[in-house]
Image: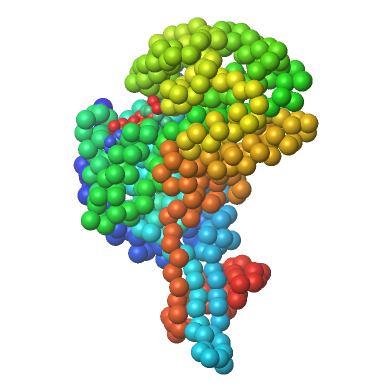
Amino acid sequence: MSYRSIIAGADADQPDVAAATTAAAEAFAGYRATTPDARADFLEAAAAEIEAAREEIVEAAVAESHLPEGRISGEVGRTTGQLKMFAGVVRRGDHLGVRIDPALPDRTPLPRADIRQRHIPLGPVAVFGASNFPLAFSTAGGDTASALAAGCPVVVKGHPAHPLTGYLVAQAITRAVEKAGLHAGTFSFLLDTDPQTGIELGQTLVTDPRIKAVGFTGSRGGGLAIVAAAATRPEPIPVYAEMSSINPVVVLPGALENDTDALATAYVGSLTLGSGQFCTNPGLLFLPTGEAGDAFLAAAGRATAEAVGTTMLTSGIASAYEKGTAALREVDGVTVVGEGTPGDTDAPAPQLVEAVRLDGVTDEVFGASGVVVRYDSVEELLPSLDSLEGQLTATVHATDADNEAAARVVGALELKAGRILFNGWPTGVEVGHAMVHGGPFPATSDSRSTSVGSLAIERFQRPVAYQDVPAALLPEAVRDDNPWQLVRRIDGELQLP
Ligand code: NAP
């Protein structure tokens, strides 16, 4: 099988970018005009259709991704939960961001016009599914859910690492589109499992003039290629690419006064979870010098040595991991602290190394590969943190006794990462309203938003102000009678309906 696509308005069972984007453009006018309730009903129906097909989706995803059934089953719940969360956002109208500055005709020296603002959707969005979350970051993942919630038709470029999973999920969404009576172009799924033409498909999609924004999760090289393609279009468009992150962990001295063995084991647990195939994998750890740090390092080495590799998502990802870990071992000043055992096919051994400096060890090695760097003092640590590239997460392990140092560390880390967490591990991202899964480059191509959580919807909207527009012509969201019962900012003050 090389193709399994669902394209509105085309009967061919092969990718046809123009058919999908033309249909998406046709669908846009009707879809963006849906009421909050109708759009939310559709998102909930998509979740229900995925849930109804859960068994076959789980079976396909387990076979294609080599991830365990429990993890995949949880991902189905996360995927449908995201769709339902966005249904709630749309029903409340949070995303419309309504602001009304009423006219002040008697203001001197000049009267003020009546100005009303709301957010509108950008237009058709291209979504590149990720390999490492075949459900929650793929066909119906956070990018698709947030774009559909914003009112944007979506064209998914399915990931060739899980073609059947993607197709089954696409079928489920298509059933929801049909049942909701929406235009078929509201959602299309394009897939090409040939590596050569697959890249061409992606490039054609991003440069198609009907596409108005892109969501991407994957490699730094792939993300940058898509950003470049979007920027050189006659009409450049925003690309929200989530790419690469090594998610630094800072262990402060107080944290080593408790059970260092338990802390080290928990660290290696997070590092090796799911073969380390998480964008939030903690790949770099700063550890104090001294006896307690030595004990932590020895325990982490032992835990790594006990870890067994599990089959990675694709042979390509496994061989990239092997190359990356071999290259790390060659860096001057790097010593191996612990090496696990390889598993069956494409299941390379987890690895933990110690490096005397950061040079050459800060590129993402996707998989269960960790680097430990020691530090003598916060004064020595802070410049190292300043030198890091942008990150999705930064973790601090500390006790109250570390508060003075921790405050300085947080001050440095918040300039680097989208999420700072204390005394936990970054793998595992809560989907909610306060979550940020983003960060400065190269974690993402645009640090001003998030790809997880309800704020993700803002990536696919823009504000429009309506000045002195006659009442009869105003959109519902900004009318005086507030027919959608929205929370609005009137003259700067939040007002409940
Ligand atoms: P990828 O190679 O970046 O591919 C992701 C998607 O982008 C695929 O659909 C791919 O299409 C497409 N693509 C890649 N290069 C393109 C280009 N130049 N123009 C247009 N489309 C392009 O990522 P992957 O296959 O999922 O995994 C490979 C590596 O990505 C991993 O080893 C890891 O380093 C990294 N990764 C990082 C994260 C993270 O969250 N940070 C997640 C997953 C993967 P085709 O496959 O059809 O070519």
Instruction: Please report the residue visible at 60 percent of the width from the left and 76 percent of the height from the top.
Output: 491
Q: Nearer the viewer, residue 32 or 341?
A: 341
* Rendered-image quarter of ligand 1: top left
**Picture quadrant of residue 289:** top right
Residue 338 in the image: state x and y as whole percent: 55, 9
Instruction: Please report the residue visible at 45 percent of the width from the left and 53 percent of the height from the top.
Output: 459
Q: Nearer the viewer, residue 327 or 456?
A: 327
**Picture quadrant of residue 173:** top left
Quarter of the picture containing the N terminus is top left
Q: Nearer the viewer, residue 417 or 61?
A: 417
Compared to residue 481, the image places residue 438 above or below, namely: above
| Most distant residue in the front direction | 379
Q: Nearer the viewer, residue 27 or 386?
A: 386
Q: Is residue 245 visible?
A: yes
Instruction: Please report the residue visible at 55 percent of the width from the left and 91 percent of the height from the top.
Output: 108
Instruction: Tell me which colouring the rendered structure shows.
Output: rainbow
Quarter of the picture containing the C terminus is bottom right
Residue 253 in the image: state x and y as whole percent: 71, 24
Residue 267 in the image: state x and y as whole percent: 62, 21
Compared to residue 308, the image places residue 384 above or below, namely: below
The tally of labels here is 0
In the image, is 429 to the left or to the right of 309? right
Compared to residue 417, the image places residue 282 above or below, namely: above
Q: Is residue 54 visible?
A: no
Compared to residue 12, the image places residue 43 above or below, namely: below
Residue 479 in the image: state x and y as whole percent: 53, 77
Instruction: Please report the residue visible at 58 percent of the width from the left and 54 percent of the height from the top.
Output: 88
